Image (cartoon, rainbow, N blue to C red):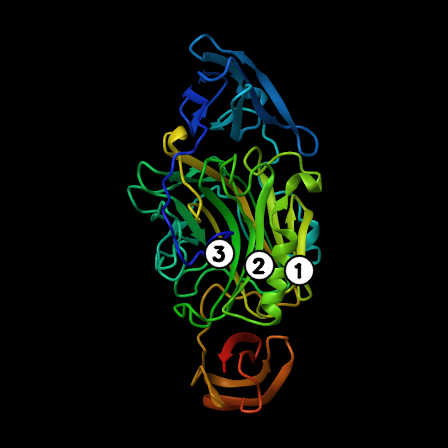
Amino acid sequence: MKKTIIISLFCVFLICETYSANLINVTSPAYCSEIQGTTTINISAPNFAQVTVYCWKQGEGFGANSIVGTVNLDANGIGSIAFAADQYPHGPVTVRISGTSSTNSDNCYLQLYNKGGVSWNEGMPADPPAAAGMNLVFSDDFTNMSIGTDGSGAKFYDHKPPHGTEDFSSIPFTDFSSTKNPFSQKDSYLRIRADANKNSSGLISSMFSNKSGFKAQAPCYFECRFIAPNAPGTWPAFWLLGVKDNINEYYEPSDELDIIEAYGGEGAGAPNSGAKYGIAAHAWVQTGIATQISDQFYATYFPANMSNHGIPSTWYEASHIYGCLVGLDYTIYYCDNIEVGRHPTLPLSKIKPFYFMINLATGGGWPVDLSRYNGLADMYVDYVRVYNSAQTGLILDKEIDIDVNIYPNPVTSETAIHLNLPKLEDISINICNVLGQSVLSYHSYQQGKIKIPINLSAESNGTYLAKIHVGNLQFNKTIIK
């Protein structure tokens, strides 16, 4: 998936350590359960004389952090409180139980699904300002689930392509068709559950291993609204990957844009405590300007701090909209339509299409401990949608019936573009370096089996990008010298 503070995501570690706090626990209702109407929350916190219960409440703008009440515990640390669920948002809610004493402090996050309550900021809002002038080309509000494996014909793939060989969660991503299926529909939400008891967690990808599915090319805008868990070691994310020419080639250069990757857990060593979450750009298997841009962005903007941008709630207390505009000049990251970071668009990002993934993973180099929460953690996705510039063609959902190949590749000096065109077509080719500068161009009208020589003997070693136009279709290919 992505590079973290400690390790590259290409290496996955299962770390099972006990989270040091866990001083407050809820005995009922069950963690990650459904509730409706006034619900009694029973609390066990022997280290405290008193705890305070909070839940984010609907209202103008971002709403507000509401105090449900204060609980005076008995000599054994036992107490309860009535949670008037109908007065709080419909759908996923997080109830925070906090305790502080002279020697201890702890937060327990009780995830619930409120079957009643007040509908607030649910469903797709108006078009976002960042997508002005673009067309809506993909959307899903999850009123129906369409998730499956390769070749299933579903809308989403249930692993990271290709074929799940690069899955990265310590609690593994699991098939939708499995008896351990991590996906379920709750009203108009997609619930992705990490379940340590079943050893399953979930990821959905807009692209399958044969490169069918949804992709979009710059200028484009992606956004998703969700709420995620803060249990130690949970790793929710919404992110983009550039489509490789050869999806099975591990070391082919590609770009990754992490719109949000958040890490659960609090206290000493917790990576994204409070209102912070990770945003990052990665120029995989690249050098030069691409890595300079990504390194500078990481140094300047990682992690994003929601409170610094006037957003009062955290990514685990309330749902938020996370967006990314991939422009031809700049790539800009948003939370609730507020810019939280930007960098010059990476060279490959300007010409290679992106697909998106949404996941609830665990691990990433951080201790995983769901024991307080009976092994469960839930991510609720409200919707995802994508906009595309009217000037840039949408990358089609299925492979075009035109063969376009480059070989040999890698190349020492000369290679060739091979096309098989069933009818006469207008062909134009532009070869660019990683700075976007054109080094070779070609134009003709041809049909049938065609071989177009490409001579790079005068060019430096590195990565080159071939933009091949056949009629009104565009194919982007990477050449490595």
Residue 28 in view of the camera: no
Residue 222 quadrant: bottom right
The image's mark for residue 343 is 1
Which x, y percent locates residue 220? 62, 60
Q: Quick check: marks 1 and 2 in contact, CB under 8 Å?
A: yes
Secondary structure category for the residue under label 1? strand
Neighbor class of circle 2 (other Cα within 10 Å; few <14, some 14-19, many 20+) is many
Q: Which residue is mark 2?
A: 281
The image's mark for residue 354 is none
The amino acid type, in three-letter code, at marker 3 is Lys
Q: Quick check: marks 2 and 3 in contact, CB under 8 Å?
A: no
Judging depth in this view, the residue of 347 and 444 nearest the camera is 347
Q: Quick check: marks 3 and 1 in contact, CB under 8 Å?
A: no
Residue 134 quadrant: bottom right
The image's mark for residue 2 is 3
Residue 65 quadrant: top right
